[in-house]
Amino acid sequence: MSGNSALCFDLALDLPQLKIRAAATLPATGVTALFGASGSGKTTLLRMLAGLEATGRGQIRLGASCWQDDTHKRRLPTHQRPLAYVFQEASLFTHLNVRENLSFGLTRARVPDRTIGFHDAVDWLGIGHLLDRLPSHLSGGERQRVAIARALLAQPRLLLMDEPLSAVDADGRDAILDTLEQLPERLGIPIIYVSHSIEEITRLADHLLLMSAGRLIADGPTNTILTRCDLPLAHGAHAGVVLQARVVEHLAHEHLTRLAFDGGELLVSTVARPIDVSARVRIAARDVAIAMSAPTDSSVINHLRADIVDINDDPNPAHCLVRLRVGKAVLLARITRHSRQRLALQPGMAVWALVKGVAVR
Ligand SMILES: Nc1ncnc2c1ncn2[C@@H]1O[C@H](COP(=O)(O)OP(=O)(O)OP(=O)(O)O)[C@@H](O)[C@H]1O
């Protein structure tokens, strides 16, 4: 795709209840998740990027193209911004079948170098068997697949996705996430993905923006933001880390796979991928325990040498959150204050991280 352009914006908008003040430069490819409490301004920010908020002001650049620069009275209208927008509810034309809805996406393509063909989009989204159906004969997940395919056929150079899976049931969501995981490599454009789901964010996003009361309060690689104890994500029920790993060995008899990451190795249930292929690994803070020596009498199979970076308060007064450095990686461990005292844990101490659960994507 002709993308390879970073998105850079500095925007302001005054609403009756909320002032939006948001500036960031996003990677030229891959998914940037936009996360924040309900009403923090995420949808409004996407609408500003799309040119849908008339009183929004500031600058937007995508690579060398200037979409908006109010100091020079320059502003491309929405239809001239090469972007596609996928909403919570698929907004398909109800009187057109799937094929006709997709063809509409193709006719909206504004760029001469069309790189995503009809069959690519149909194939990627797995909707070949649905082409003759009307939207009223599709499930929520199928409708959203068609909406995503239609968005891609507009050949966007920026893809905005606003909670695209919130109206899809759990099985449909999981299947669409499998598809979305492939998109960054196939598209090579920036994708902004609004979600309230840590699972979706950790599966898809390399980069994370945190929004609170109209402001971007954090912007950085997903794992950096997830492990910053001054930010809310490290303290929620789903606190944890995401690590990039690669398949090293399959232990067929034991139904296990050995993965390597920046801080060592992990044994996990068989991952059906060839050697050397990468895997994204999620480790929840509640699944990491701490020991002073390598346990020889524990059923936990993953023991990693670690140094305590710091020990932080947790909203649950019985717990504390320990940041651990494991090689170049950082893990979070949620342990009881009781254990912290019993083991006399202090920053800088060398310990063992016992990893009880690893989710591999
Ligand atoms: N055009 C508008 N005029 C007045 N207020 C608005 C307008 N658009 C949004 N708001 C208000 O701005 C705030 C932010 O809304 P927005 O939909 O951007 O939040 P959000 O973070 O996307 O929320 P959610 O996660 O619930 O979708 C809300 O209080 C909303 O009511």
Image (spheres, helix red, strand yellow):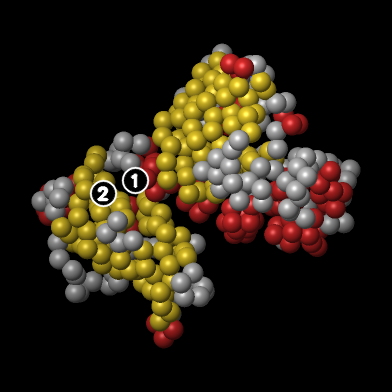
Circle 2 is placed at which residue position?
323
What residue is shown at x 39% (from left), y 70% (from top)? 259
Using residue 321 as the reference point, say whether residue 195 is left or right of it.
right
Q: Residue lying furthest top in this view?
A: 16
Q: Position of residue 321 (x, y in %)?
A: 26, 46
Q: Position of residue 354 (x, y in %)?
A: 26, 63
Q: Which residue type carries mark 1?
A: Thr
Using residue 167 as the reference point, say whether residue 356 is left or right of it.
left
Q: Which mark is residue 266?
A: none
Whether tag 1 and tag 2 are in contact, CB under 8 A, the answer is yes
Q: Which one is nearer the viewer's eye here, 184 or 290? A: 184
Earlier sequence position, callout 1 versus callout 2: 1
Quadrant location, ligand no. 1: top right
The answer to whether residue 259 of the structure is visible from this angle is yes
Secondary structure, mark 1, is loop
What residue is shown at x 41% (from left), y 34% (from top)? 218
- When the figure is inspected, residue 83 is found, relative to residue 292, above or below; the finding is above
What residue is shown at x 30% (from left), y 61% (from top)? 263
Q: Residue lying furthest bottom in this view?
A: 253
Circle 1 is placed at which residue position?
227
